Amino acid sequence: MKTKTILLSLALSLCLASTVAITVSCEKSGLEDEPMVGATKPGIIPTPTLYGNEFDIKSDGTTISGTSNGYSFRIAAGELTLSNFKCYLSGGKQYFDIISSCNLTLVGGSSITAYNGASIRISDVKLSGRGTITIIRNNKDFSILKSHISAAEGYTVKVSDVKDEGGGYYSCKWTVV
């Protein structure tokens, strides 16, 4: 449990000042990774077009790795690789959208976390490679995502049960075996 002390100056009506200490206790939610402060760009090869804070990915064979915080993704590539990619989305204007059929190769462990109304929309995705993708969001109904994510030919995908991460967030993991 983290504890912070906040000093609050209160001006009294007689122009006297008094300092009051307020202790605020914050319990960490069950989430493994929390969003970072400030924008962080992931590694993307080849470099896609960037419109403000939106990556517009259209090239087949694109690989995304590293950590992204503060960026949205609009993906219309037929073939995409996620390599140990961690994506943090926060706020109603941030999103991770795969808008067309996509063969998604997983390398290592990747995750997409949507906080505070950010969205994850996925069209028809076929998984391959050797790895996992975990999606964390504040909605425990993963039925639509599960119906749009499946194994590519020659691969098997295991889908976990929905896990309560605490703090109103839920996760589901897809593993290519």
Image (tube, rainbow, N blue to C red):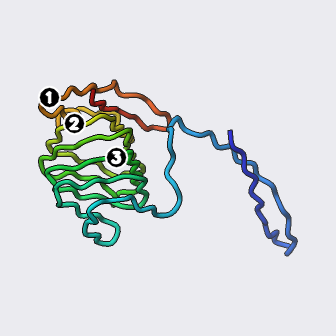
Q: Say which quarter of the image contains residue 123.
A: top left
Q: Amino acid at mark 2?
A: Ser
At numbered mark 3, what does the secondary structure look like: helix, strand or loop?
strand
Q: Classify residue 38 as left or right of residue 114.
A: right
Eyeballing the image, is 5 above or below 161?
Answer: below
Q: Nearer the viewer, residue 129 or 98?
A: 129
Write the residue at 29% across / 60% down.
45
Q: Amino acid at mark 1?
A: Gly
Residue 49 position, x and y percent, is 25, 69
| Sequence-first disc among 1 and 3 | 3
- Neighbour tally class for label 3: few under 14, some 14-19, many 20 plus, Cα within 10 Å: many
**On the image, numbered disc 1 is attached to which residue?**
154
Q: Are marks 2 and 1 in contact (CB under 8 Å)?
A: yes
Q: Amino acid at mark 3?
A: Ser
Q: Nearer the viewer, residue 90 or 177?
A: 177
| Sequence-first disc among 3 and 2 | 3
Residue 29 position, x and y percent, is 54, 38
**On the image, numbered disc 3 is attached to which residue?**
83
Residue 54 position, x and y percent, is 30, 65
**On the image, numbered disc 2 is attached to which residue?**
128
Q: Are marks 3 and 2 in contact (CB under 8 Å)?
A: no
